Amino acid sequence: MKVSRPVIRALVVPFAFSPLSIAIAQDSQTPQLDPIVVTATLGPKTVGESLTSVTVIEEDDIRYQQPKEFRELIESQPGVSVVPNGSFGKTTSVFIRGNSSDASVLLVDGIRIRSATLGGAAWQHLPPQLINRVEIVRGSRSSLYGADATGGVIQAFTLPQNEGETGWLEAGGGNYNSQQYAAGAALANDSSKLSIGINQFRTDGAPVVTGGEDKSYKNTSGVASGRHQFDNGVRLGFTFLNAEGNTEYDGGEQDFVFQVAGVNLDVPITANWRASLQFSDARDEMEDFSSFPGVFNTRTRNSRLENWLTFGAHEFVLGAEYTVDQVDSTVVYDERSRSNSAFFSQALLNFDALDVHLSLRSDDNETFGTEQTWGVGVGYALNKNYRVRASAGTSFKAPTFNDLYYPGFGNPDLQPEEATSYELGIEGRYTRWFWDAAVFQSDVEDLSLPSQNAAGSIPEARLRGVELSSGWRQNGWNLRAVASVGDFENKEDGKQLIRRAENTIRVDLDKEVGTWVFGTTIRAEDQRPDQYYDMSTFSSVRTQMPGYGVWDLRAQKTFASGFVASLTVGNVLDKEYATAKKDVSTDYISAGRLAFLSVRYNFGH
């Protein structure tokens, strides 16, 4: 890999001298730091049983960090590099293991949302205040989720009420004239549960480019969910999340709508057969007000059936899925809709210490034809604490409506991006701490170029790297440290792929002291190439963006009366750093220091 020794030392040394590395591995108790995840295998499995690299961001982590943007939760996590075009609701790209930003799937409560024209999700508009858990699954998942799950899948779960709470109110404010207001309520009995929540975050914002003016952001969001279990075991549920508002950017502003809605039915047919049916609707809408105004509304409707069959310790899934993408835009596309039919299967086999996962999927798209993908994973538990795993799989990313049909830009002959991925990992999990190490490689054909270029692709790219993560909980301490070292290159010329940071590190540390919680986050990303479009020469120019580091602080106080006060200080050192290049003399930049104080009252305590 093209990684210098000083960089490697900077990423690995914190692990070598952390309490995680010197903790005694002789703990013979049952492992506890092995949370349940559902994204990796469609159903509940522990992280260890999922046989893939998974990062879980728990409710406590989100509550302590008090993020204002969703990207704050996933930035610099293992294999994840986030590139925003400025702070507070500005266009955000998420690269997982060096794959294209639109080659990662975003799910909200199991419902996929993305822009059918741009391809990627509007990560910047997902309200973290209404999220209580995040699962980041890295590596190929097209054999379960279809197109675009090449880099991985990130699933956000919306906010339910904490046990014992019947409602809550929250208000807060900070510099940049930032304000937040929220409220929620819940009703529950033995068979039913209903919860709702609303949140508004608004700010005058900060400059998004060097020498620019403050750019505001407003996001008003709401979430509702409910479920009921009948006497015969049938479960009926629904989920709804809507976020809408306005964001200013350099050169204009946009009104947006980010919305998912779904109904699911779970039916136990026999003791060994369970069927699950979901209908969902996801909308990504945007109206642009600039020198080139326009409307870009996309809608994705999905029907999905899963049949779960259990035979002893083995589980099998047989399913089908039908998806329709629709575009309603002021730009005239040659095609405004397309459908995709899919059949998929999964086998989760357990032979005592040996686990085997097999998956196979076939997608038939009316635009680009049929794509078959497969996945295989093998895991072996050396004992109750240590497990080794290996996996391989294929994936593809579908060309977007912009790639295919945008006037003067699209190429209707563009074919799906295809990849073959491999991973080898080992992990140790104990009562109070864990560690995980993984190496991976993906060979990608027809890797998509960024949207500011004419639609095209890189014939062959190689993405490989190492990911390290570890965590420790004891006596009120909660420490998590992660690092990634990568090599993402164009095999044709050997150059590093643009916008991807190859080397990242992040440390989150929180300490409970009585009714107080004190915490900090330190993260850093290495330099990375970028490119901008030169209007004078009508060509793309490659440049280099410097690396950066960020330090955040936080404190939280719980009062016996049900009040919780939280203070967060982001970017403590008030460091201005560039996240992307706009043109020859202009960078997209981060906001400076943000201090924010909020107070929450929980009813029912």
Image (cartoon, rainbow, N blue to C red):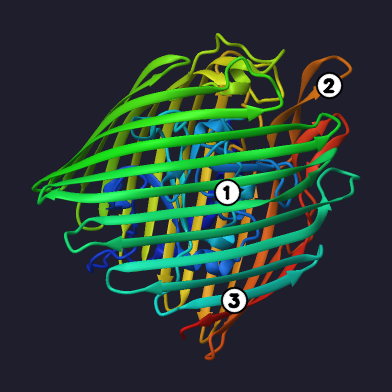
Mark 3 = which residue? 169
Label 2 sits on a secondary structure element that is strand
Q: Nearer the viewer, residue 112 or 58?
A: 112
From the viewer's perspective, is the residue at label 2 or at label 3 nearer?
A: 3
Q: CA distance from mark 2 to mark 3?
A: 49 Å
Coordinates of residue 600 in the picture (x, y in percent): 60, 78
| x 61%, y 52%: residue | 243
- Quadrant location of residue 67? bottom right
Judge left or right: residue 228 versus residue 146.
left
Coordinates of residue 395 in the picture (x, y in percent): 40, 26
- Quadrant location of residue 380? top left
Q: Nearer the viewer, residue 155 or 292?
A: 292
How would you rate the neighbour count of disc 1 (Cα within 10 Å): few for under 14, some for 14-19, many for 20 or more?
Answer: many
Q: CA distance from mark 3 to mark 1?
A: 31 Å
Q: CA distance from mark 2 to mark 1?
A: 30 Å
Q: Which mark is residue 76?
A: 1
Choose the circle earlier in sequence order: 2 or 3: 3
Label 1 sits on a secondary structure element that is loop
Judge left or right: residue 518 versus residue 209.
left
Mark 2 = which residue? 534
From the viewer's perspective, is the residue at label 3 or at label 1 nearer?
A: 3
